[in-house]
Image (tube, rainbow, N blue to C red):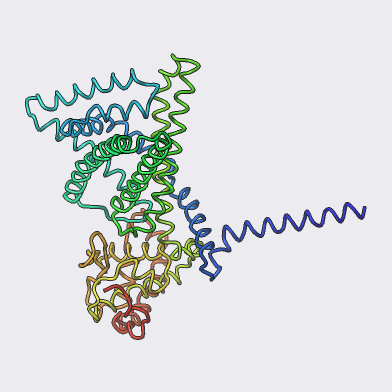
Amino acid sequence: MTDRNTDSKPRNAFVEKAVSLYNYLTTGIWSDPRRTWWLNVLRTLNLSVNSFFNRDIQTQACALTYRTMLAVVPALALLLAIGRGFGMQQVLQDELYQLFPAQHVAINYAMNFINSYLQQASEGVFVGVGIVFLLWTLISLLGNVEDTFNLIWGQKGGRSIWRKLSDYTAMLLILPVLMICASGISLLLSSTLNAIFHFDFMTPVISWLLEGAQCLMTFLFFTAVYMLIPNTKVKFKNAFISGCISGIGFLVLQWLFVTGTLYVTRYNAIYGSFAFIPLLLLWMQLAWVICLAGAVICYSSQNVFAFSLDREVGSISQHYRDKVTVAITAAIAYRFVHRLGPASARDLMDNFELPARLVTTVTDRLCAAGICNRVLVADQKDVYGFQLAIDPAQLTLGELRHGLYNLGSSDFITNFSKNFPKVLQAFDKLDKAYADVADNITVASLIDNIPNLNTAQK
């Protein structure tokens, strides 16, 4: 009996420690005031996992997979059309054969279809119609990708239609050129190094160098995606770390896909040919999951400190939300009065240690109520700030409350006033009592002694 009790105590202690560790990693870590590098990594992983499931990345990846399938032929057609101009169409075809080694017949069929597509686009009644349709299909795909990235970053406003046309067209024309140049440089380096170094032992070294260069280009590609596509400012450090993680995941996925395709066709050639389409869909789905997961990591690593109170924000009281709303309005008014320029969401989060989710919610409501305007920061591209639409010396707390409380639909329930007349009378008295005091307090009178804003971004 004594031995059993002695054994049970260590087991119970182990279970308690495990539960305590789990609670700390899931919730307690956000209350830990320390900011060591390993705690930052744990917070980033915690926030990434929560953001991955809260934003339903799997469903977003499925939607992008479907849209990508619609844009596969136009994308390959554009890539091959530019490749022809450089005289490297065969190089691009060889890259596809290397990526899908068991599907040479399917790739040849696709190439014939794409050649026919390009011929129809260039010989139709209106030559430009086919090219416009091709570009519009790809621009629509990039627009959907931007919407998904903005959802991850919590950005409400996207690029304007003219910005999309100019930015996306530039990306669609530049990226294929870079891909073709990269393939040409790879072939040039391979042939040049092999010609210079005739030693047999240098062959694997050259191969490792070329593979390392390709890996680096993959990392830089994902880094560029995470920096350029979201309609917000992304730091290079966070984008590069996320790009390396996504690049490694993509390269592993590519190796598994090639190996799996060879494995299937080795045992059943008929099934392997049939499995090309579902395997391609699976590859696209997983590739988008990896890409979006990297975007979540980039977002989490850049905003990890701003989400230290995210759990509390989810259950915030209306009273405390009103206080934070007035405080954010006062901070925006401070920058307006002292001519410091519009306050961005990053300014509000960094200077006052406000949670990003709360800042986004409050500023969106202030803009929707017409109290603030969302404007571009003068010295930064694609960075939006918030500026009062009303003179802070005339904006009272009563007007602020009236604008926010009346935001949205109201008076749509039939016979509500007849069924609850006493309720309406009570709220009329409460509103009048609040207005008698709040109409005498201006936002400009609340901006004295606000700390930290002198160090805000000007």
Q: Nearer the viewer, residue 153 or 362?
A: 153
In the image, residue 338 sits, relative to residue 183, either above or below, namely below
| Rendering quarter of residue 411 | bottom left
The residue at the far left in this view is: 125
Count of marks overlaid on the render: 0
Image point (72%, 58%), residue name: 16
Q: Is residue 212 left or right of residue 16?
A: left
Q: Position of residue 454 (x, y in %)?
A: 32, 80
Q: Position of residue 127 (x, y in %)?
A: 8, 29
The residue at the far front in this view is: 199
Q: Is residue 49 left or right of residue 295?
A: right
- For the C terminus, which image quadrant? bottom left
| Rendering quarter of residue 191 | top left
Q: Nearer the viewer, residue 135 or 269?
A: 269
Q: Is residue 161 left or right of residue 95?
A: left
Q: Position of residue 85 (x, y in %)?
A: 15, 33
Image point (50%, 54%), residue name: 45
Q: Position of residue 320 (x, y in %)?
A: 45, 71
The residue at the far right in this view is: 1
Q: Nearer the viewer, residue 172 or 141?
A: 172
In the image, residue 430 sits, relative to residue 27, either above or below, namely below
